[in-house]
Structures are given as C-alpha cells and as structure tokens.
Image (spheres, rainbow, N blue to C red):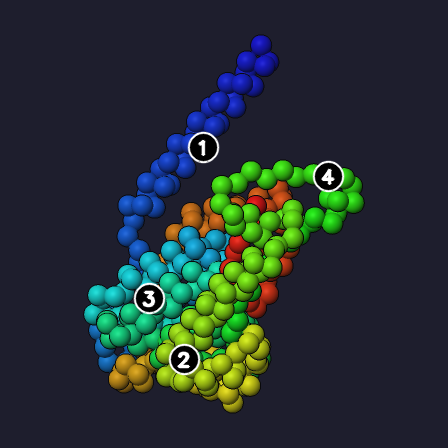
Amino acid sequence: MDRNRIALAVTFVVTILSLLVGLINLASSASPSKLTRVDGSSGFGTDRLGATLIKIEGEIHSGSSSYESAGAQTILHQLRAVEDDSNIVGVLIEINSPGGSVGASQEIYKEIMYLRKEKNKKVVVSMKDIAASGGYYIASAADKIYALGGTLTGSIGVIAIAPNIKGLLDRYGVKVRTFKEGKYKDSLSLFRDNTPEEDTMIQKMLSDTYEEFVEDVAKGRNQTVKFVEALAEGRVYSGQDAFRNKLVDDIGGRREALAELSKLCNYEGTLPLYEEEANPWDKFFQLLQAKSGSVFGGEKAILQELKRSPVLVLYPQAMAW
C-alpha cells in the first residue's frame, strides 16, 4: 500500500513538473526579445535611439551560449536582431574570453564585418580580463578596440590537441581494435601514434587555418598581412603592449568604448546603451545545467583546461568524448 502511494506521489510530481516546464518553454518562445537600457545618457535622440550591448564571455563554441560560455548561435542571433533596426546605430561588444573553436569565431567575425560593411552599423569592442585568440579574432572585426591595461590579448595562433594513451595501454596489455572505412578516419586517435603522413596532413590543416586567421585580422585592422604575422605566432600581450603594437586602438573600459562609439555614430552626447533582456528561465536552466555538470563529471579535465587556455582550437574527433 505504501509503495503504491509513493509511486502515485512520484508520478504526480513528475507530471506537474513536466507541465510546468512545457508552459515555461511555450511562454519563452512566445515572448519577443526586449532591449533593456543599461547605460548612457539621453542625448538628443528618441527614447530608443542608441546602441546595443553584446557580451561574449567564456569559451567560444558553436550552438547556444551556456551559463559560462559563448555560443555562436546565440551571439549571431543578437547581432542579426539589430541589422535592420534603424534606432540601433551601433554595437558595443564586451569580450572576456580565452578563445574557442575556429568555426564559431569565424562566424561571429564575419557577421560583425557584415554589420559594418553592409548595414552601416558602427562596432566597438571593449576587452575585459582576457580577449585572446578566438576572442581577439572576433575583436579584430570591429571599427575600434579598447583594452584595459591589464587585459591579456593577442595569441594569434591555432592548435589541435589529442591525448595519446597508447603507452599506458601497452604497459597493461590492453588492446584496442579499430574498424574503419577510410585511411585517415582515426587520425589523432587516443589509441595509436600518428603516421608521418598524418602529421603532415594535420599540420597543413593548421597552417591553412592560421593563414586565414592572420588574413582576417589584417583585413579587420586595416593592416598588412606582414604586419600581423610579425605580431602573431601565438604571442600573448598585455593591453598596454597591444596598444603599443597597434593590436588595439586605445586603453579604457566600457565608458571610453561607449564614448568612442557615440563619436563614430555622430551622436551628440553619450549613446543610450541597450542589452537584450535575458529570459529568467533560461538563466535558471543554464545554472542548473552548470551545477549538474559539476556533479556528474561533465567533460574531461584535459578539455576543460584547454578551454581555459588562450588558444584558437581545432577540436579533433578524438576529443569529442
């Protein structure tokens, strides 16, 4: 009898929670995004004439942003939301990121360039603690870049890392059988050494991506490829050093970046700054996801450490565990 009551109670609770989650998702999808004012003086514009604030925080990756990372899909949605909004004349992007995946960084870079060149929006970047590699890649697409004196930036380079546990397996007599169709399908495998031919192939892939990184930075910064190459190769700079080397335009934070954006937009005074209003339920579920990830293990420590490093990463299949 007690068991039946417990089962009935559990079923009831699960049903109620399912209905609640369904209603939350329905309300979230039905509610349009709103812009909330976060900074800036009124100046002489209309109530909503101003700039939008977009934050890129944590590891940059494809898909949606999480509680502690920046997803390209989310950032692109925010950028595209203001493409045809005549009241939003500028974009202030705050970056606090060590980098991330190549494709995601390139997508955001190209969207910013499109906003500038095709939609005539002015874009200014304000760097926080760190804006390195993929973070700098994105920043280089802006009209102007501001960094703090202690910001870590630069790190123009590309890396691919895959652990190799072959020696450990050999020591304990563990054999791994691999079935594949395609000579290179298990390149960067955990369980064997690469062949010299595979090393050459992977290095070529990295070289091509690195060249594109350098070329895009040169295009965004209106510099020559030779100029960027001299500052690249993975070197990391402080904000002051980046300013001296013309990787950023000036030293300052949000106040200075917003003042520059207002000037670029020919706005008399300081542009009102708006930010897309976050859905509180999205925040709740992101926090819940982050907490559950820490409880149940999440990704391997080596990948987490790589994400915290100031590098632009090519994630090989061997790391997608």
Q: Position of residue 66 (x, y in %)?
A: 48, 53
From what the image shows, is residue 260 above or below residue 113? below
Q: Amino acid at mark 3?
A: Glu
Q: Which mark is residue 17?
A: 1
- Residues tagged 2 and 3 counted as in contact (Cβ below 8 A): no
Dot 1: few (<14), some (14–19), or many (≥20) neighbours within 10 Å? few
Q: Amino acid at mark 4?
A: Val
- For label 3, the residue is 111
Give the secondary structure at mark 4.
Answer: loop
Q: Position of residue 77 (x, y in %)?
A: 33, 58
- CA–CA distance in space, label 4 to label 1: 46 Å
Q: Position of residue 131 (x, y in %)?
A: 51, 72
- For label 2, the residue is 218
Number of the front mark, 4 or 2: 4
Question: Which residue appears at 45% of the width and 32% of the height?
Answer: 17
- Residues tagged 4 and 1 counted as in contact (Cβ below 8 A): no
Q: Which mark is residue 174?
A: 4
Answer yes or no: is residue 96 visible. Answer: no
Front in this rendered view, residue 229 or 283: 229
